[in-house]
Structures are given as C-alpha cells and as structure tokens.
Image (cartoon, rainbow, N blue to C red):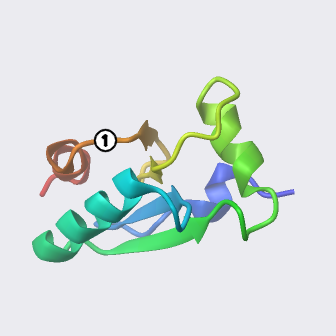
Amino acid sequence: MSTLADFTPEAGSITMFSTVWCGYCKRLKLMLDKTGIPYTIVDIEETPGTEELVKAVNGGNAVVPTLVYPDGTTATNPSLNDVKAALGV
C-alpha cells in the first residue's frame, strides 16, 4: 500500500496528484511551467492507491490538485504564490 512518503518530492519540487480532466490542475501546471518550478504528476485515476491517499488528506474527498511538498506536508488546490511560499522560492 502506498503512503504519502512514497510521493514526497526532492527539495525545490512538488508532487501533484491530478486527473487528466481537472481544469484547476491544468492551470496550475501552466503556471508552474512558466515559473520553472519542477513537479511530478501522479494521475489518481491511473495510479493504484493514490485516490485513497488524496481522500485521506482531504476529509474523504478526492480533491485535485493535491500537492505534496518536500517536507511531507500537503496542500489542496493551492495558488502559485502558496506553492512558491512553501518551497521558499
């Protein structure tokens, strides 16, 4: 069984739990690309066990984007400024 620790990114980057149809995810990806912040996408509909992880940190709801930061903390649908602040960028 997967844990959040399995998806904790390297310093300076994030892991984004996402789906292909999520508009908020697409928007955040575009902003991350423009800013140069590295990220790894994990599709919760394609990667077994990840929907359950997202639900565990979101009160039982499969809300995307849910991010994992290098310190192991998570954020749900954060703004680009929130991501920058969490990474110290």
Q: Quadrant of the N terminus?
A: bottom right
Image quarter where the C terminus lies is bottom left
The location of residue 21, given as percent across then percent down, is 51, 62
Q: Amino acid at mark 1?
A: Pro
Q: Between 75 and 24, which is closer to the camera in this rendering?
A: 24
**Does residue 72 appear left or right of residue 47 in this picture?**
left
Look at the picture and state if 24 lies above or below 8.
above
Crowd class of label 1 (few under 14; some 14 to 19; many from 20; radius 10 Å): some
Residue drawn at x 68%, y 37% is: 55
- Residue pictured at 21% horizontal, 75% vertical: 33
Name the image quarter holding residue 42: bottom right
Where does residue 20 sit, x and y in percent of width and height? Answer: 53, 68
Of 8 and 39, nearer the camera is 39
**Residue 12 versus residue 80 in the image, above or below:** below
Taking depth in this image into account, of 81 and 65 the one nearest to the observer is 65
* Percent of width and height locating residue 69: 41, 52
Instruction: Give the residue at the far top of this rendering.
Output: 59
**Residue 5, how many percent across, how many down?**
64, 55
Give me the residue at 45% from left, 51% from top: 67
Q: Which residue is mark 1?
A: 78
Q: Is 19 situated above or below 24?
A: below
Q: Quadrant of residue 2?
A: bottom right
Q: Secondary structure at mark 1?
A: loop
| Left or right: residue 38 compared with residue 42 | left
